[in-house]
Image (cartoon, rainbow, N blue to C red):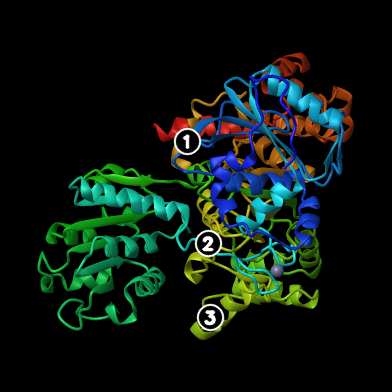
């Protein structure tokens, strides 16, 4: 811990151990660890590693995660120091700054004074900080009466070992929950989101309610919540219904984990009459056929999974027939026209509601770092059957050795070593991609519907131990792939709807020890509606987005990203989006304008200043002529950009928006 005497009593130095948000990470820290941990800490990149790690540790779902401003190179987060909550600004310097000089932090320190409501200033450096830089930081903090804290490499080492990011024995980064040396940090079995839901369920029962709906994003472990809560409610006879076979299988294993194998039965015929156990899992179709065998008070705890189907006749009949002590509805998508009906079936009682967006914004789910890479597959001649592309045609277009080589190159560049799931267009495609990875020396296998139960178990084990790097699959829901330790996703087929995009993405966002974010590599060609991918990033379901769109002005952020997320598109992808938006079917001034702003902000961030008209002309296909056409004139466009800035504020605007739609 570096110590600096405060110049005045107004803003004073606080020890990082006093930051309550860090306490849990520190309590796990060993007294001593190998010096290699410090070496690793010094090698961490400020943007892609240091910041996500710190954000991960800071998260407390019961607090508003963000303050009023995201400023260039500074992130703000609400923290509690010695019991006093307040907004903290973090300036983090990683491997790019082995020696932190005044000019490295000057602009950020200057910015500190501009943030309103700031209580704490925190400077973290993994390298050496020169006295002048330190003094500049301390005197600004003191003058503006902010308490401040300085973190050095040893502090980070304690935090990161304690939080399970780094192995204390050899300093290696922990992947998929364990180190190559065999070390595995202890971590909670339930994720924060599950704990939160269980807490609320307890509360709702205490208040006398007998039904409730839990809305959680795909892949966040809903079934485990049902099993844990049924146990907490001390239920004697439990019925679990859903309508898809694979979901039933997941339910069986989750309930077995909580109640023991001997207490769980999956019914395949006459569900109530014969062989009932404490936990009864059945398809809704079966229950419906044998409803006459069920007495209203047969079950004291009933779980209806995929509750968005509950408005269907079959479910209604069941729910009006039974009278359990508690009815739990589970769903990921409550936003349908008949939403009100569904809620009524649960006494209008929403227990928790987390969409993917809220999950990421509040730190319950991991943020994503998304890379939209150009894919020169030509989709124009691939047959499209109204809803999707013809699979045989797709196979012919996508199974090309050159494409696989490009995919592997990108993976090496952006996600090497991370447990990766690749989404392919067919079984054949999945097998070919896996083979390509293998021939490049990267262990890869297919995980598809024809993969047997025993083979799946072995694959999962090899995947989690890091022996296997890439799993190639097709339809994630049908295959039942749901591994929280996934740290990278490859989208190798056209993503034709936001539903598919969100389902795929959701599989990578579960939190796990040692995982700070999920890398997403998307290969984007000229497939139908590719330009809509820009909109999917905000993780807001289509139905809500439509309602928001009418209110969204041109000057709203181009990419309305959830907290901690990053998005990069190749220039050729941007050109492609633009071309599609120029298509008379899709084009509006609004959609084209958003792309132009994105392109401009990207150049602004790269240059560190506003690009000129000439620079835009020289380096982009969409030159100044387009800006004139869409915005009227370059000057008018500049006026708009005066309000926008270079785009680093996107994340916070995302938060504002999230608050907006939550209150819809
Ligand atoms: Zn180790």
Q: Is mark 2 within 8 Å of ligand 1?
A: no
Distance of mark 2 from mark 3, alpha carbons? 22 Å
Looking at the image, residue 64 lies above or below residue 332: above
Distance of mark 2 from mark 1, alpha carbons? 40 Å
Q: Earlier in the sequence, mark 2 or mark 3?
A: 2
Q: In this orientation, does residue 510 appear?
A: yes
Q: Earlier in the sequence, mark 2 or mark 1?
A: 2
Numbered disc in front, either 2 or 3: 2
Name the quadrant containing residue 293. bottom left
Q: Quadrant of ligand 1?
A: bottom right
Camera-side residue of 134 and 437: 134
Sort mark 2 into few (<14), some (14-19) or many (20+) by Cα contacts within 10 Å: some
Determine which of the numbered discs, if any, sits on residue 546 in the image. Answer: 1
Q: Is mark 3 within 8 Å of ligand 1?
A: no
Q: Quadrant of the C terminus?
A: top left
Element at label 1: helix
Sort mark 3 into few (<14), some (14-19) or many (20+) by Cα contacts within 10 Å: few
Q: How many marks?
A: 3
The structure residue drawn at horizontal position 34% and vertical position 63%, both measured from the top left corner, is 228
Q: Which residue does the numbered mark 3 point to in the structure image?
A: 457
Q: Quadrant of the N terminus?
A: top right
The structure residue drawn at horizontal position 63% and vertical position 68%, both measured from the top left corner, is 178
Looking at the image, residue 636 lies above or below residue 164: above
Element at label 2: loop
Sort mark 1 into few (<14), some (14-19) or many (20+) by Cα contacts within 10 Å: few
Q: Which residue does the numbered mark 2 point to in the structure image?
A: 187
Determine which of the numbered discs, if any, sits on residue 306 in the image. Answer: none
């Amino acid at each position: 811990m570096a110590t600096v005497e405060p110049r005045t009593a107004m803003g004073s130095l606080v020890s990082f151990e006093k930051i309550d948000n860090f306490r849990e990470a520190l309590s796990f820290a060993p007294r001593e660890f190998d010096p290699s941990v410090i070496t690793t800490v010094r090698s961490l990149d400020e943007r892609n590693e240091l910041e996500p790690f710190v954000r991960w540790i800071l998260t407390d779902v019961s607090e508003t995660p963000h303050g009023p401003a995201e400023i260039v190179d500074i992130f703000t987060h609400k923290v509690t120091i010695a019991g006093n909550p307040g907004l903290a600004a973090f300036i983090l310097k990683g491997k790019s700054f082995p020696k932190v000089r005044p000019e490295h932090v000057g602009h950020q320190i200057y910015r500190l004074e501009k943030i309103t409501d700031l209580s704490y200033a925190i400077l973290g450096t993994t390298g050496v900080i020169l006295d002048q830089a330190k003094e500049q930081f301390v005197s600004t903090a003191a003058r503006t009466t902010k308490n401040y804290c300085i973190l050095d490499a040893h502090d980070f080492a304690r935090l990161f070992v304690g939080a399970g990011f780094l192995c204390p024995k050899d300093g290696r980064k922990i992947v998929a929950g364990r180190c190559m040396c065999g070390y595995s940090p202890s971590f909670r079995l339930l994720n924060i989101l599950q704990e939160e839901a269980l807490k609320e369920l307890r509360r709702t029962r205490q208040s006398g309610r007998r039904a409730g709906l839990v809305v959680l994003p795909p892949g966040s472990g809903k079934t485990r919540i049902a099993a844990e809560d049924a146990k907490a409610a001390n239920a004697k006879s439990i019925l679990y219904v859903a309508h898809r076979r694979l979901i039933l299988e997941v339910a069986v294993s989750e309930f077995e984990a909580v109640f023991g194998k001997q207490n769980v039965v999956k019914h395949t015929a006459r569900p109530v009459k014969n062989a009932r156990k404490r936990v009864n899992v059945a398809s809704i179709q079966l229950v419906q056929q044998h409803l006459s065998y069920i007495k209203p008070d047969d079950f004291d705890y009933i779980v209806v999974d995929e509750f968005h189907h509950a408005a269907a006749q079959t479910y209604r009949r069941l729910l009006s027939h039974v009278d359990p002590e508690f009815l739990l509805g589970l769903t990921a998508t409550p936003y349908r026209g008949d939403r009100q009906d569904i809620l009524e079936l649960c006494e209008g009682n929403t227990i928790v509601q987390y969409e993917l967006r809220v999950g990421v914004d509040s730190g319950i789910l991991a943020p994503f770092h998304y890379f939209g890479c150009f894919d020169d597959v030509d989709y124009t001649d691939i047959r499209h059957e109204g809803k999707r592309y013809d699979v045989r045609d797709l196979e012919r277009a996508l199974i090309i050795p050159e494409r696989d080589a490009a995919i592997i190159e990108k993976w090496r560049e952006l996600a090497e070593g991370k447990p990766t799931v690749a989404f392919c267009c067919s079984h054949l495609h999945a097998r070919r991609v896996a083979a390509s990875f293998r021939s490049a020396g990267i262990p890869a296998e297919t995980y598809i519907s024809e993969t047997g139960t025993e083979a799946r178990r072995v694959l999962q084990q090899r995947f989690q131990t890091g022996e296997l790097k890439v799993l190639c699959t097709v339809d994630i829901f049908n295959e039942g792939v749901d591994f929280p330790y996934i740290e990278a996703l490859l989208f190798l087929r056209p993503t034709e709807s936001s539903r598919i995009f969100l389902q795929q993405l959701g599989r990578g966002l579960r939190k796990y020890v040692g995982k700070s974010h999920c890398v997403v590599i998307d290969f984007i060609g000229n497939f139908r509606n590719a330009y809509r991918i820009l909109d999917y990033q905000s993780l807001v379901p289509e139905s809500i987005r439509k309602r928001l769109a009418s209110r969204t002005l041109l000057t709203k952020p181009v990419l309305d990203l959830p907290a901690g997320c990053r998005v990069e598109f190749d220039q050729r992808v941007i050109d492609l989006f633009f071309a599609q938006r120029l298509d008379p079917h899709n084009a509006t001034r609004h959609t084209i304008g958003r792309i132009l702003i994105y392109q401009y902000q990207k150049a602004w961030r790269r240059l560190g200043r506003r690009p000129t008209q000439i620079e835009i002309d020289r380096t982009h296909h969409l030159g100044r002529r387009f800006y004139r056409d869409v915005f009227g004139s370059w000057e008018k466009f500049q006026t708009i950009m005066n309000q926008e800035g270079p785009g680093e504020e996107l994340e916070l605007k995302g938060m504002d928006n999230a608050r907006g739609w939550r209150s819809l």
